[in-house]
Amino acid sequence: MIFTVAIDGPAAAGKGTISKAVAARFGLAHLDTGLLYRAVGALVLAGADPVVAARTLNPADLEGDHLRTPAVADAASKVAVIPDVRLALVDFQRSFARRDGGAVLDGRDIGTVICPQAEVKLYVTASAERRADRRYQELVGKGLDVTPQGVLDDVRARDARDSGRDTAPLKPAEDAIIIDTSDLSIDEAVERAAAAIAAKWPL
Ligand code: DC
């Protein structure tokens, strides 16, 4: 069975949580494509050339808690602007999307560029303030030294960079279903996504 669920949206809108939950519920493989850009960003912070890093990325590069730090998120958003970095990551994402058994991919350009033929396209968003508040709680929970204003500034800077770039900017696909999680619980958001998938489920 080929069945792709594309879940796009800005940072900290809840894409990751929703993606994992629906992948488990429907028995689909899941790829967090942000991790690819974070891995390239981390390699660049360690001195690598971004395009070389993207072309030679290997599974071990995708491991490690360091990929979840604000510094790596910022570096990821910067390398993601480079067209050759994006190009180097396309084939892997496309073959994952069309793998047998079905897949959920979350990112910024899955429904628009990586897999425009996806059977289900969701655009998960929330206000910058709600997203920053959630990300702040998450980072504090991990023991990181951050401030609410600093996290909000980071979220806004990443939004501007991810939406403003020329290549594959963050935007909803024309046929995407928008899920605004500003005033939804995690369970409510997951149920909306699951209902959208169930409506297109092939069996
Ligand atoms: O989803 P995330 O926060 O882990 O993504 C980190 C950065 O990677 C994000 O700011 C922009 C970039 N990215 C992208 O350009 N395209 C994707 N499909 C996924 C992430």
Image (cartoon, helix red, strand yellow):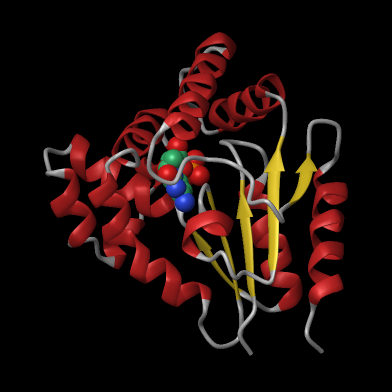
Q: Quadrant of residue 94?
A: bottom left
Q: In this view, does 107 lie above or below 160?
A: below
Quick one: 129 or 116, which is closer to the camera?
116
Question: Toward which corner of the image does residue 118 lie, by quadrant?
Answer: bottom right
- Asked if residue 106 shows in the view, the reply is no
On the picture, is 165 further left or further right than 123?
left
Q: In which quarter of the image is the N terminus?
A: bottom right
Q: Which residue is drawn at 59% across and 13% down?
A: 148
Task: Give the mark count.
Answer: 0
Quadrant location of the C terminus?
Answer: bottom right
- Quadrant of the image occupied by residue 82: top left
Q: Which residue is drawn at 74% across and 76% down?
A: 26
Q: Where is residue 192 in the image (x, y as percent from the top left)?
A: 85, 55
Left or right: residue 153 versus residue 187 is left
| 51 with respect to 2 (left or right) | left
Residue at 71% of width from left, 56% of height from top?
175
Splitting the image into four quadrants, where does ligand 1 fall?
top left
Q: Where 161 sits versus 92, above or below?
A: above
Q: Nearer the viewer, residue 46 or 40?
A: 40
Q: Is residue 49 visible?
A: yes
Residue 141 position in % (x across, y down): 59, 31
Residue 167: image location, x then y, percent: 38, 43
**What residue is rendered at 71% in x and 53% in y?**
176
In this view, which residue lies farthest toward the top? Answer: 149
Where is residue 15 shown, x and y percent of the image? 64, 48
Taking depth in this image into account, of 177 and 35 the one nearest to the observer is 177
